[in-house]
């Protein structure tokens, strides 16, 4: 049975910003699986009604299994869902305020502030998510899906590939240039691949341009994540997704590009709908059974 709201306390007048701040404090510092992050996102958007849910209610609303909700509560350090729900109610109905911040920043903090501004530029550029959704749908429909990244862009390509293979049946990361890359592009095209996601961040390797030229030669479409709207790489792309690169640190920071790729993966999962979520659930179940990840 669901609990009734607190007498005399209207949900409509609760401070939404305070609730979100309290919930983020509850979630921060914990490593959550994709399914658990789905639950967290649902709670951030629907906390005022979720405080009255059972674990089965929350699982149904968030689109996950009931064991995933139980594992979510455990991942946050609670002994069970009832204890977590009490903490959730405190976050919603309590009167705690976010801690005050000091406006004085040192040099490193100023560099981080510059990075935050880049992320804000990325956020503003996604005000219309139409292109992101279009590209996500195209990539999700490509089997195999190819992810290309060389030199400094290779780690982000591998991160994207590692996460994408949790929800797609065939993901291939291409990080070796030259004839080997040409062979792999050709074989993938013959196997039915339609799209390659290329990550081209400065400094731009000459071999990346050569790889994109070959991709077009074997009739693959190209989605490019880069920081410049015009250039030799963008001329070869069918879709260009822009993410600013911060050059204030001794080495370039790719925080915005990483967030953009994560947003692209998130949108791909939405595109796949039940199929992608089922693959994520299966991965979580296998990982829990095999005790792949530390819990303490």
Image (cartoon, rainbow, N blue to C red):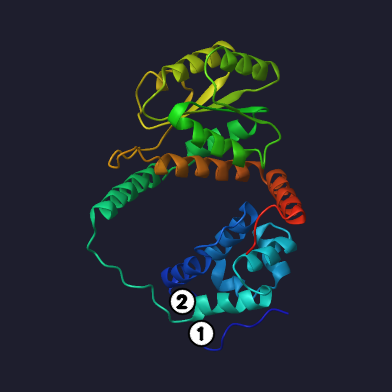
Which class describes the residues within 10 Å of circle 2: few (<14), some (14-19), or many (20+)? few
44 above or below 228?
Answer: below
Residue 27 shows in the view:
yes
Q: Total of numbered circles in the picture?
A: 2
Q: Is residue 126 left or right of residue 104?
A: right
| Residue 240 in view, yes or no | no
Q: Residue at x 66, y 54 (%)?
A: 293
Judge left or right: residue 134 versus residue 204: right
According to the picture, the residue beneath numbered tag 1 turns out to be 9
Alpha-carbon span between mark 2 and mark 1: 8 Å
* 177 up-or-down from 85: above or below: above
User: Which element type, helix, strand or loop, lies under badge 2?
Assistant: loop
Residue, far bottom:
7
Residue 15 on image: x %, y %: 43, 74
**x, y (%) of residue 152?**
43, 31
Q: Earlier in the sequence, mark 2 or mark 1?
A: 1
Q: Position of residue 245 (x, y in %)?
A: 35, 37
Q: Are marks 2 and 1 in contact (CB under 8 Å)?
A: yes
Viewer-side residue, 165 vs 30: 30
Q: Quadrant of the C terminus?
A: bottom right
**What residue do we see at 31% from left, 72% from top?**
100
Please give the label number shown on residue 14: 2
Between residue 233 and residue 50, name the one nearer to us: 233
Q: Residue at x 53, y 33 (%)?
A: 157
Residue 269 in the image: state x and y as whole percent: 62, 44
Query: Which quadrant does the N terminus fall into?
Result: bottom right
Residue name at image x 49 percent, y 13 percent: 213
Q: Which of the labelled discs sits on residue 201, or is there none?
A: none
Left or right: 59 with respect to 252? right
């Amino acid at each position: 049975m669901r609990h009734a709201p607190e007498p005399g306390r209207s949900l409509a007048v609760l401070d939404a910003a305070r609730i979100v701040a309290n919930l983020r404090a509850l979630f921060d510092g914990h490593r959550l699986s994709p399914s658990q992050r789905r639950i967290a996102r649902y709670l951030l958007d629907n906390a005022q009604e979720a405080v009255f849910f059972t674990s089965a209610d929350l699982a149904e609303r968030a689109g996950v299994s009931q064991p995933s909700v139980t594992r979510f509560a455990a991942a946050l350090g609670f002994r069970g869902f009832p204890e977590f729900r009490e903490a959730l109610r405190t976050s919603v109905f309590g009167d705690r305020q976010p801690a005050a911040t000091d406006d004085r920043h040192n040099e490193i903090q100023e560099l981080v502030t510059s990075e935050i501004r880049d992320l804000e530029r990325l956020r503003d550029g996604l005000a219309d998510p139409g292109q992101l959704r279009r590209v996500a749908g195209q990539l999700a429909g490509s089997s195999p899906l190819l992810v290309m990244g060389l030199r400094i862009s290779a780690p982000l390509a591998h991160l994207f590939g590692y996460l994408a293979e949790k929800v797609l049946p065939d993901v291939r990361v291409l990080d070796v240039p030259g004839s080997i890359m040409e062979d792999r592009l050709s074989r993938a095209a013959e196997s039915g691949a339609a799209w390659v996601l290329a990550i081209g961040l400065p400094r731009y390797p000459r071999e990346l341009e050569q790889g994109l030229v070959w991709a077009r030669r074997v009739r693959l479409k190209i989605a490019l994540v880069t920081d410049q709207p015009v250039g030799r790489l963008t001329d070869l792309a069918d879709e260009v997704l822009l993410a600013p690169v911060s050059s204030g640190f001794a080495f370039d920071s790719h925080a915005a590009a990483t967030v953009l790729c994560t947003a692209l993966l998130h949108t791909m999962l939405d595109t796949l709908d039940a199929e992608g979520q089922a693959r994520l659930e299966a991965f979580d179940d296998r990982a829990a059974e095999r005790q792949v990840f530390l819990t303490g």
